[in-house]
Amino acid sequence: MLNRIDEWKSDLNFLSATKAQRYTALLMSGMAALLWAVRGWDSGIGSYGISLHYSVFVIYGLEYAILNWWMDNAENIQGIRNLIISVSWTIFSVAVFEWYWGLGYALLHGELWVLTPMNPVYTELIAITLIGILGGIYAIRQGIRLSMDGITMLALLSALVWFAAGFPQTCYPSVEGTVIYIENNLVHLFNVLAKAGLALATAWTLMNKRPHEMLFQFLMGSLCALIGGLCARAQFCYYTF
């Protein structure tokens, strides 16, 4: 009984309480999912095309919660150490998707400026990438082994198919040299699924597969297969503009 009381008392200290960290991430992602459902598919904080979409909070909040749970239960890494690894690797997965998006948009749409200092987003991503790399090094020093198994390969393959399909987007350059946004829910759905697939694939590299996780891997494989299957339809929408 005393141990259980002490356990819940420790949850009052967010920075050192693993459970509190995880509960907070789940609460935030749940609130974002509710706003997403109520306000509509393309809703976010800001106007269409440049808004901070609610899917960001849902996807990366859940990724953090999964990493936090795994480090606690499978690797016995708790408290501040868990916080450092889970936060830094979640941030790194943001960088993975954004670098991929930037390269795809720049190369296939002829907009190389998005990879230069003219676009402050990608200069900021350099710092995010470094944080993720340092977090990965810290995780390895804590005894975690990186894993590149089937689920990661499926997600990366889906990303390559997306690239080969012409990288369909909702933003296009105009003759005035600005960027215009054309609403396309199918392309937007594909982008969100790709973001989720790459985020969870990045998280999976820190999670060594065990037999009781096969169901989760099956669900992730299904998600990646869905991403790949949407490529042809997304390509069709791309050529309709």
Image (cartoon, helix red, strand yellow):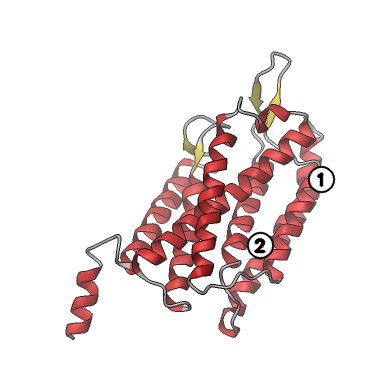
Image quarter of the N terminus: bottom left
Residue type pointed to by label 2: Leu
Question: What x and y, as percent, mark residue 114?
Answer: 66, 30
Using the image, determine if residue 128 lies above or below residue 122: below
Q: Residue at x 39, y 51 (%)?
A: 31
| 72 sits to left or right of 120 | left
Report if residue 192 is visible in the image: no
Q: In the rendering, at what x and y percent does residue 180 appear? A: 65, 24
Quadrant of residue 133 in the image?
A: bottom right
Tell me what residue is drawn at x 63 percent, y 67 percent: 220
Say the numbered circle drawn on residue 17: none
Residue 223, labelled with which disc?
A: 2
Q: Is residue 129 above or below residue 176?
A: below
How many C-alpha atoms fall within 10 Å of the one at disc 2: few (<14), some, or many (≥20)? Answer: some
Residue 42 image position (x, y, % from top left)? 55, 39
The number of callouts visible is: 2
Q: Residue furthest front?
A: 141
Q: 194 above or below 12?
A: above
The earlier-in-sequence mark between 1 and 2 is 1
In the displayed orientation, state which residue is furthest to the top: 176
Residue 218, horizontal then vertical, whole percent: 65, 73
| Residue 34 visible here | yes
Q: Which residue is drawn at the image coordinates 66% and 62% (left, top)?
A: 223
The answer to which image quadrant residue 108 occupies is top right
Name the secondary structure under disc 1.
loop
Q: Is residue 30 above or below residue 73?
A: above
Mark linked to residue 165: 1
Which residue type carries mark 1?
Ala
